[in-house]
Image: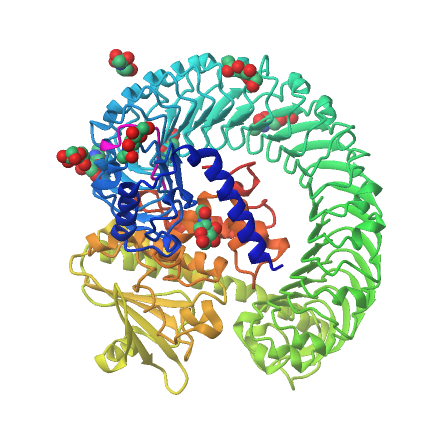
Amino acid sequence: MTKTTSLLLIHFSFYTIFLLLFSHANSKLNAEEQAILLNLKQHWQNPQPLRHWTPSNSVSHCYWPEITCTDGSVTGISLPNMTITGTVPPFICDLNNLTAIDLSYNYMTSNGFPTAFYNCSKLVNLDVSQNNFVGKVPDDIHRMAGLRQLNIGGNGFSGNIPASIGRLTELRILKLFACQFNGSFPPEIGNLSNLERLELAYMTTIMPARLPLEFTKLKKLKYLWMAGSSLVGEIPDTIGEMVALEHLDLSRNNLSGNIPSSLFMLKNLSKVFLYINQLSGEIPRVAEALNINVLDLSENDFTGSIPDDFERLTKLSGLSLFFNQLSGKIPDSIGRLPELINLKLFNNNLSGTLPPDLGRYSMLEEFLVLSNKLTGHLPQHLGDNGRLTRVEVSDNNLSGQLPKSLGSCNNLIILRVENNRFSGNIPSGLWTLLSLCKLLLSNNSFTGELPERLSRNLSRLEMSHNKFSGNIPAGLTALPLLTALLLDQNQFSGSLPSHFLSWKSLTTLHLSRNAISGQIPEEFGSLPRLTDLDLSENQLSGQIPLQLGLLKQLDSLNLSSNHLIGKIPNEFENDAFAGSFLNNPRLCANSPSLNIPKCNSKPQNSSKISSTFLASIIGLVIAILLVSAASFFVIRNYLKKKHGLDIKWELTPFQRLNFTESDILPGIIENNVIGSGGSGKVYRVVVNPPREIVAVKRIMNNKRLEQKLEKQFLAEVKILSSIQHTNIVKLRCCIFNDHSKLLVYEYLENRSLDLWLHGESARGSPILAVVGSYGYIAPEYAHTTRVNEKIDVYSFGVILLELTTGRKACDGDEYTSLAEWAWRHFQEGRYVVDACLDEVVKELCYLDEMYGVFELGIICTGPSPLTRPSMKEVLKVLLRCNDQTLVYGEKNTHATLTSTV
Ligand SMILES: *[C@@H]1O[C@H](CO)[C@@H](O)[C@H](O)[C@H]1NC(C)=O
Ligand SMILES: *[C@@H]1O[C@H](CO)[C@@H](O)[C@H](O)[C@H]1NC(C)=O
Ligand SMILES: *[C@@H]1O[C@H](CO)[C@@H](O)[C@H](O)[C@H]1NC(C)=O
Ligand SMILES: *[C@@H]1O[C@H](CO)[C@@H](O)[C@H](O)[C@H]1NC(C)=O
Ligand SMILES: *[C@@H]1O[C@H](CO)[C@@H](O)[C@H](O)[C@H]1NC(C)=O
Ligand SMILES: *[C@@H]1O[C@H](CO)[C@@H](O)[C@H](O)[C@H]1NC(C)=O
Ligand SMILES: *[C@@H]1O[C@H](CO)[C@@H](O)[C@H](O)[C@H]1NC(C)=O
Ligand SMILES: *[C@@H]1O[C@H](CO)[C@@H](O)[C@H](O)[C@H]1NC(C)=O
């Protein structure tokens, strides 16, 4: 029997039972109700998922899975995620026994709350969340007096939340999250004395206000979700009167003051999220709140120590107190909590030794205490239960050896112990743990040798500044995912492996300050991603292999202080490599700017060496002068501009240029247009023949840009221009006057942004013209003509979403743009998002980073321009994603990002 037939049979029997149980007593076909349902289907233009809704006078519509009947009459319609477009028709309430309507996750529209529902006089449960409804919720909403559940979240409703909502006194569940309401939260909500669940989160447009005191009158409320809703001031002491409270999420607000101790009198409190606020003072003792399961108070200003009665929290599985100013010792009793899974205490001022029993009694998975002042050893039993996925203890004063048991933690993904005083050998099992992605050991006193075989999944191996010794084994080159290998400042010796088995991902290789001898293998020339190579201060000899010159993407090269001889490859005859070859007395170059002897000149003597040194000092001074001069010109230009003295074109370079504005301007002609977008046209301009081709994007402006905006624009463009990333077109300079701006990019023949993002499937459209087409453009762009930064941030956000999901901007699904599509998935939580990340680039090791970038994309494409970050902030977060000295983007470390919707 096939799966389909068996499924059909199961369905068939289900409906039979259904029929017997509910409809048999009154099985006569209610033809009138069936007609109404068929009209609904037609009104919504026959959505595909409702194709089985067909007229029949033998089979009752009560068998349709979306329909619930009671006594043969329709009482429930459940149509979530049915690709329904259009409005709510008034005749829906002709089904006058309806008690439950679920139209969530569709594409329905209306101007204002659909008052058609008012006529459903028996309505109890109404869910219209995650649609495209906009406009006001009317003041007479209380007419739906029987409602027990109302969910209108994830729509574009705006204006005030009507106070009359407080008159729906039967309500048990009220969800208004992620709408565009302004004004303030009506205190009348506190009159809903039966309310059990209240969701008002991510109301980013609401006026900053205190948590209404009246809400704390809700004696039956179990679930309060007001994350990201502009709350300011203190948490009211009366919160201790909300005796039924189990789940409290006030994260991502601007709350200040202490946590009232009354909060921890609540016996049923289980999940508490107060992260990302400005709460201060000491963390109160847990008193009566012994059911707490997750406590996240991170990213606040708490001081004092971790209360010593936390040992009473026998159900605690997640404790996050990171990014505060907590001091004192971590209570030893924390190590004995039987349910503890995640412990995140990093970036505080904690001192003393770690709880000795950590890992001994619980299934600890994440242990993050980096950036504190901890001393002593790692807990001996830390790895005993084998569940650990992350251990991050860097930037402390820890010493001793790593516990052996870490080597048998088969789930360990990240181990970071850098910047401590650890010593001894690395537990041998660690090297080959298949789960391990990042092993960061730098700045300790570890000893021992590298093994011949290492885990193939390592993506970062950092061992700088230790006492490791021995050879660099060939097995180290057999790591296909390795992106960074830092072995500098150790006692490695012998020669470099001459066969690179697989370093396909390697971008950074630091081997400086060891005792490595022999030649530089020519195979370096075939590392496709290498951008940063440092072999300085070793005993390398022989010539620099010509193949090294083939590394086009190399940004940083240091071969100084070795015994290299001969002429450097021609590709390096370039100022950019001025410091790359110093102190190799027998090395020579043609260009004087490299600060090494000129080829074919007389052999060196010792006085020449010191003149080389002198030359490099002079070079440095000249460089400083140049930088000062450049700043002077930039400032002068800015000042000139500010005073409006100069209406001529001005050029701000972001790189060394071989052209001036007079080379570019003649090329801004119609014949050179290769595309046009929302904000202007793109030209292909040939300058400085025969080589240089640039793409020029012209942004027209009718009015003078405000000075402030101008300055900001320049500053941000400058940062962008300094990013080195293969996926970002390089900005070379900006040319502007009061009316027009020209952004000059490097031109890549037949390569567009689109092409970069979508490889094979690309359409070959011109550079950046893509920005300005459907999917990239912020929704408010329809209402404004001014080119503004927040519109660009939106477009950039779409690009981030494209990179992480592998989808195109216009490719949400049938009815949505990618941004809307992503937002829907985001709402459903981390697991759903993880599942929809691009399979092509998805790596277990980078899941957090990818999620971080996806989330940044979500924030950048927020519907309200006010809540979008500036480009500066975006870059800060992106750089943070990439920065190994800081942990992952803050958000990934919170137990839940969005509480379940
Ligand atoms: C909506 O339906 C599609 C396909 O029918 C499915 O893949 C998706 O998971 C559903 N989403 C929700 C929220 O139910
Ligand atoms: C609603 O239910 C009542 C009895 O439960 C029934 O008499 C009435 O016909 C139903 N209404 C419709 C429109 O079927
Ligand atoms: C409710 O039904 C009455 C009678 O059918 C109709 O006149 C009225 O317009 C309806 N109200 C709404 C809000 O649809
Ligand atoms: C609130 O929104 C309404 C409708 O969008 C708008 O007319 C009103 O000006 C807004 N009020 C405030 C204070 O922003
Ligand atoms: C509802 O709450 C408001 C403000 O909190 C109060 O003024 C009003 O009297 C309450 N209404 C009822 C019916 O309890
Ligand atoms: C607390 O939870 C218990 C167990 O679920 C329940 O019986 C009790 O009624 C709750 N207390 C309050 C005040 O809601
Ligand atoms: C929070 O408060 C700080 C100053 O206390 C302010 O700079 C910031 O803009 C506020 N943030 C929000 C979201 O209100
Ligand atoms: C951190 O703790 C030290 C003492 O261990 C103290 O001197 C210092 O002020 C503390 N710093 C902060 C920011 O609390």
Q: How is the image coloured?
A: rainbow
Magenta stretch secondary structure, dominant: loop
Residue in view at x 27 percent, y 80 percent: 672
Residue in view at x 67 percent, y 40 percent: 395
Vertical placement of residue 774 versus 167, above or below: below
Q: Is residue 590 left or right of residue 28?
A: right
* Residue 355 screen position, x and y as percent: 74, 27
**Nearer-the-camera pick, 455 or 73:** 73
* Residue 623 screen position, x and y as percent: 49, 64
- Where ligand 7 lies, by image quadrant? top left
* Residue 724 screen position, x and y as percent: 49, 64
Tell how many labels.
0
Residue in view at x 37 percent, y 50 percent: 861
Q: Is residue 338 left or right of residue 768?
A: right
Quarter of the image with the N terminus is bottom right
Quarter of the image with the C terminus is top left
Residue 536 is at least partly visible in this image:
yes
Which quadrant of the view contains residue 75?
top left
* Residue 21 screen position, x and y as percent: 48, 34
Residue 267 is at least partly visible in this image:
no
Q: Is residue 683 left or right of residue 409?
A: left
| Magenta residues (range) | 119-129
Which quadrant of the view contains residue 473?
bottom right
Is residue 842 in the magenta section?
no
